Image (cartoon, helix red, strand yellow):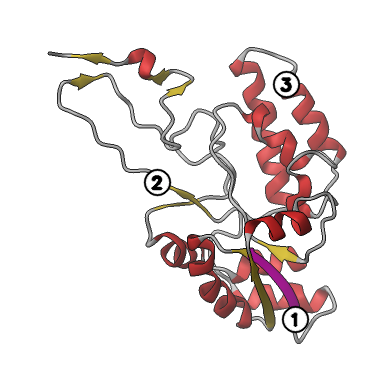
Amino acid sequence: DVRKAIAYAIDKDELLVGAADGVGETINQFYPENTAWHTDAEDEYRSKNIEKAKELLAAAGYPDGFEVEFLAFTYGPYIKMLPVLERELAEIGIKLKIETMDFTSWNARVAGGKGDFQMSVVGHGYASDPQAILPALYIANAQHNYVTGYKYDNAEMTAELEKGAASGDAAVRKPHYDRVVNIAIEDLPTIWVYSSSFPIGWRSYVKGLEPHKGAHTHYEGGGMAHVWLDK
């Protein structure tokens, strides 16, 4: 309920403006819209709802909110976003005790196998295939499961990820990863906020180039393999 309260309390559009001057799009999953593995999944946290957030906090035993340690490493967008996040969570009584540090120190506490944190923020580079990122996030004790303090473990999630990895056919795999997204929205082990946009320019004689959300030059169904020069 606490994670759900936080999700209701934040305004992702405001956080995007604060972190990246509004350049990007808000998300509720790893893959943004108009990418091959995006899931058309709505969630109830799209609109800020302070009243609902306060109800959930009270139900969780925190009617007056609480203070929580928030760790962040000194990466520009995260530092820029923090004042916005701090203000938004204060509206429901959650006070952030922010500690900033260099990446090495942050990594040792958060991602170094200890899960020594209460709240934090981190981003992930684009992965062209969900098998390269989603199991690492959502399977217990996997590489990137540190985002949950190595505590998230859902048997249905693990089963769907294993089924998605068992086939080489994207049409067979996609429903399993769709379910993964919906389980993550239900459980909220993490709260996805935004996906950065990467402006790309090219000469007029470059043909067949379809800009990719993650600025990749090689990806399924597109990329440099489909490009030619009209000159």
Q: Quick check: 142 left or right of 37? A: right
- Point out the stretch of residues depicted in magenta: 67-72
Residue sitting at x 51%, y 74%: 84
Q: Nearer the viewer, residue 157 or 116?
A: 116
Identify the residue under disc 2. Answer: 197
| Disc 3 residue type (three-letter) | Ala
Report if residue 98 lies within the magenta region.
no
Q: Quick check: 38 left or right of 138? A: left
Residue sitting at x 72%, y 42%: 137
Q: Secondary structure at mark 3?
A: helix
Q: Nearer the viewer, residue 132 or 51?
A: 132
- Residue 172 lies, in percent from the top left, at 65, 17
Circle on res. 67:
1
- Residue 101 lies, in percent from the top left, at 64, 66
View extreme (bottom): residue? 64
Tell me the quarter of the image containing the N terminus. bottom right
Q: Is residue 188 visible?
A: no
| Disc 2 residue type (three-letter) | Ser
How far is disc 2 from disc 1 in space, using C-alphas? 33 Å
Q: Secondary structure at mark 1?
A: strand
Identify the residue under disc 3. Answer: 165
